[in-house]
Image (cartoon, rainbow, N blue to C red):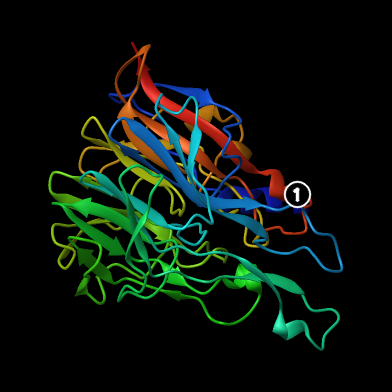
Amino acid sequence: MLGVVLASVVAACVPQLPPAAPTRFGAHEWTAVADGAPWGARAGVESVMLGDSMFVVGGRTPKPYTPFPKGPIPGDSTIWGDTWRSDDLGRTWTRVHEEGQPDSWPARSYHEVVVQGDRMVLLGGQNFIVDVNPACAANPFCYPRVASRSEFFDDVWASTDGATWTPLTTDAPWEGRAGLSAAVLDGAIYLLGGSVNDDVSIVGGPPVRQLFNDVWRSVDGVTWERVTAAAPWAPRAGASVAVRDGWLYLFGGEYGFTGSPPPYFNDVWRTRDGANWELVTRSAGWSPRPGHTCDVLDGTFVCFGGYGQSPLPWDVFGRSSPMDAWVSDDGATWTRMATVPWNATTEAAIRYDYDTVVAPGGPGTTGDAIYTFGGDRETFNFFDPSQWRNVDDDVWRFARPG
């Protein structure tokens, strides 16, 4: 009897996906372009297409598991301050900038890099500094005893080739933050959302994480104007943004890493100026999620990936990542594609905190493609000694065979 009741509870908690339907991308396929890229396993990474070259910038690589009593150490990672370049659509890579050079920006992850004209612009982000948890000083049973406490950046850097970087400002007027979103609209850089201070899931205590819903604009990356202190959408981090037809669109995000119910969004908003926003839909067809991507491919929004916490109330540290991909012509009405991102056969293969670019599909394809770089498949169960291995070092392409 208990088994029947438990099965009923599980069935009620697990959302049912709507059936897939034909879309204009029905012939597109997922293909691994590179596996074991030399930049290694990375999450919170940024990628852009500048001219004919792809760039991978910064990110984090989890360090091996640290056993008790010192560990586990939530968030313990190597943070990267380098830049890699590919001139053959992601197949081969060359490191063109290393941390520690005279023109280096501090190593970081969960930052943003956008393309503005003939240059790429890097904004914000965070690092991880392993430190003793002050709450554990007098308590031998306290956890986590050692935690990663981050610095959050408010600087802006620019480069035309990925090799040489110029600081545009080392102290922008917006508060240092990570998990922010940024895009270029009508030639200006827009920065929105993000958070400062680590989530309680990582550090187990104060300082309290603060989320933002402000919007900033700059035409040069040096001087910034706050166009609104509080947009009508709820403060968040981990949202995706895209620009189409003179509009900047905002998709989903999170206001916490774990919780019951999961503290995630699936709303869609848009703006022409960063100050005035329209609600496109309060609940898109895809499930609430952070760490996903939404790109414009052939004029159509394509959203996939992201983190999904287990829907079971007692399984706060479990995951149920979304094995789906969605398309929309207007951001309001969504259709689920039959394809599964990265050809995943289980939800454990779905990643979040990767990055994407839209670029030519290359030989053997027709038209443009979406490329993905790296990504995270970890859960928040820091006592699992295998979790640190669940970060990817590959490049995938979603393209129509030619």
Mark 1: give few (<14), some (14-19) or many (20+) Cα within 10 Å.
few
- Residue 23 position (above or below residue 38): above
Q: Position of residue 297 (x, y in %)?
A: 28, 32
Q: Position of residue 224 (x, y in %)?
A: 22, 70
The residue indicated by pointer 1 is 3
Rendering quarter of residue 400 = top left
Viewer-side residue, 390 vs 82:
82
Instruction: Name the residue at 46% across, 52% down.
Output: 291
Instruction: Name the residue at 45% across, 54% down.
Output: 290
Instruction: Name the residue at 41% across, 58% down.
Output: 253
Q: Position of residue 3 (x, y in %)?
A: 75, 49
In the image, 206: left or right of 88? Answer: right
Instruction: For the C terminus, give its image quadrant.
Output: top left
Rendering quarter of residue 220 = bottom left
Kind of residue at badge 1: Gly
- Residue 311 position (above or below residue 362): below
**Badge 1 element:** helix
The residue furthest bottom is 138
